Image (cartoon, rainbow, N blue to C red):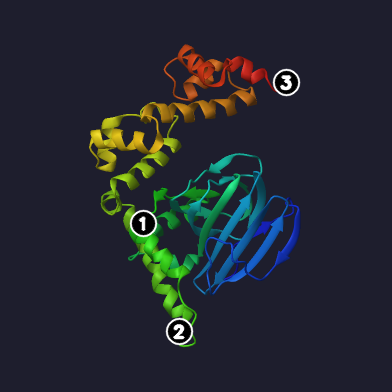
C-alpha cells in the first residue's frame, strides 16, 4: 500500500539526515525502513513498513522547543493512531484544532485529502499510525462492525475529518504492539503472513472496545483513571462533566476509589482538574478578543462571570479583561 501521509519538514533547521538507524531511539522496528533527521534542538525519526493491506509508520519527534510541521493526506484515508509519548495537536491550516490526543490513547480517524498541521510539544513525542486499505475494512464488516460502520458513515457523509472515540491502551493491546517491535527477522519467516494476524488482532481489540463494558473489563482502576482524565479534558467545557455519579456509572468504578486514585495520580481533585482546563481554554478565547468575558464564562462552563473572574485572577494574578488586553 502506498504512503497516505506526506510530511513537510521545511520548517525545521535540518543539518543532518541519514537512512541508518541510531541506537538512542525508544523503539526500533527491525523490519522497517528508517529515516533519521537531526535539526537544531532535536531529532525526528521515521520508521515505516508497507504492505498491500496497510501502511504503518512510527514517528519519534524529540525537541527542546515546540514545533509545527505540515502534512498532506494524499487521498481519503482511514487511520489508527497510537500515542505512546507526548501530547501532539492536530489542526487545520487555518488553526482550527481537530484533535489533541494525549499519551496512552489510541483511536481511529478518517481524513479526506488535504493539508493538516501537527504541533509537537517540547520533549519526546512518539506516535504510531497505521493507514488501512479502505476496501479491506469494508470487506471485514462482520469481523469489524464498529470500524466498518464508522467508515461507511464517513464515505457517505463526505466529511473532511471524523474520529471514533479515543481510548486508553489496555494491557492486551500493549502486548500485541510489543510483539511487533520484537518480531525477529529470520530467513524462514514470512513477514507479511506473520504480521497480518497481529494487525487484525489490534483492530479487533479496538472494535470490541467500543463496547465500554468489554473495554473497561480489561483495565485496572489506575488505567481507568487515565481514561477518565482524557474524558474530562475533552469534555471540560460541559457543565455536567464533573457529575461524579455519572462518571462512576460510565467507568464502573466506586466513588471512593475514583476520588482517592484520581487525587493520588493527579495531585488534585476532579473539580480542580476540570477547572484548570477550563481556565486554559478561556485564555485562548480571551486572546482572540471576539467574545465578552460573560460569553467566555458561559462557553467555558463556569457558573457565573464573577466566579470565573475570581478563579482566573487567583490562578494568573490578573483579571480576564487585563489578560485579553496584554497583547495589544
Q: Residue furthest front?
A: 24
Give the Cα distance between marks 1 and 3. Answer: 49 Å
Quarter holding residue 173: bottom left
The disc, 2 or 3, on the residue closer to the chain's N-terminal end is 2
- Mark 2 or 1, which is nearer the eye? 2
- The location of residue 183, given as percent across then percent down, is 45, 74
Give the Cα distance between marks 2 and 1. Answer: 32 Å
Query: Who's the residue at 25% across and 40% down the image?
Result: 253
Q: Which residue is mark 2?
A: 189
Seen in the picture, residue 152 relative to 33 is either above or below; the reply is: above
Q: Are marks 2 and 1 in contact (CB under 8 Å)?
A: no
Query: Who's the residue at 35% across and 55% down the image?
Result: 170
The reply to whether residue 41 is in sight is yes
The disc placed on residue 146 is 1
The disc, 2 or 1, on the residue closer to the chain's N-terminal end is 1
- The location of residue 135, given as percent across then percent down, is 47, 68
Q: Secondary structure at mark 3?
A: loop
- Mark 2 or 3, which is nearer the eye? 2
Q: Nearer the viewer, residue 131 or 273?
A: 273
Give the Cα distance between marks 2 and 3. Answer: 64 Å
The reply to whether residue 145 is in sight is no
The disc placed on residue 328 is 3
Amino acid at each position: 500500500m502506498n504512503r497516505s501521509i506526506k510530511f513537510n519538514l521545511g520548517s525545521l533547521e535540518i543539518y543532518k539526515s541519514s537512512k541508518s538507524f541510531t541506537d538512542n531511539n525508544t523503539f526500533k522496528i527491525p523490519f522497517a525502513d528508517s529515516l533519521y533527521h537531526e535539526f537544531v534542538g532535536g531529532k525526528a525519526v521515521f520508521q515505516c513498513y508497507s504492505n498491500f493491506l496497510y501502511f504503518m509508520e512510527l514517528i519519534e519527534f524529540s525537541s527542546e522547543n515546540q514545533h509545527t510541521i505540515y502534512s498532506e493526506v494524499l487521498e481519503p484515508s482511514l487511520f489508527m493512531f497510537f500515542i505512546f509519548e507526548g501530547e501532539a495537536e492536530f489542526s487545520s491550516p487555518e488553526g482550527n484544532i481537530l484533535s489533541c490526543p494525549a499519551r496512552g490513547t489510541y483511536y481511529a480517524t478518517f481524513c479526506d485529502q488535504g493539508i493538516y498541521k501537527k504541533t509537537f510539544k517540547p520533549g519526546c513525542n512518539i506516535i504510531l499510525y497505521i493507514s488501512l486499505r479502505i476496501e479491506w475494512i469494508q470487506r471485514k464488516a462482520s469481523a469489524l462492525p464498529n470500524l466498518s460502520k464508522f467508515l461507511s458513515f464517513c464515505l457517505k457523509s463526505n466529511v473532511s475529518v471524523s474520529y471514533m472515540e479515543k481510548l486508553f491502551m489496555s494491557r492486551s493491546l500493549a502486548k500485541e504492539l510489543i510483539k511487533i517491535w520484537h518480531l525477529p527477522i529470520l530467513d524462514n519467516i514470512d513477514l507479511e503472513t506473520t504480521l497480518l494476524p497481529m494487525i487484525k488482532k489490534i483492530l479487533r481489540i479496538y472494535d470490541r472496545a467500543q463496547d465500554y463494558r468489554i473495554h473497561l473489563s480489561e483495565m485496572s482502576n489506575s488505567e481507568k483513571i487515565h481514561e477518565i482524565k482524557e474524558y474530562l479534558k475533552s469534555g471540560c467545557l460541559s457543565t455536567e462533566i464533573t457529575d461524579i455519579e455519572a462518571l462512576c456509572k460510565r467507568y464502573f468504578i466506586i466513588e471512593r476509589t475514583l476520588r482517592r486514585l484520581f487525587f493520588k495520580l493527579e495531585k488534585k481533585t476532579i473539580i480542580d482538574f476540570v477547572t484548570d482546563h477550563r481556565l486554559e481554554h478561556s485564555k485562548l478565547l480571551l486572546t482572540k478578543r471576539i467574545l465578552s468575558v460573560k460569553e467566555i464564562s458561559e462557553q467555558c462552563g463556569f457558573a457565573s462571570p464573577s466566579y470565573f473572574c475570581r478563579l482566573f485572577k487567583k490562578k494568573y494574578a490578573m483579571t480576564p479583561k487585563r489578560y485579553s488586553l496584554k497583547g495589544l
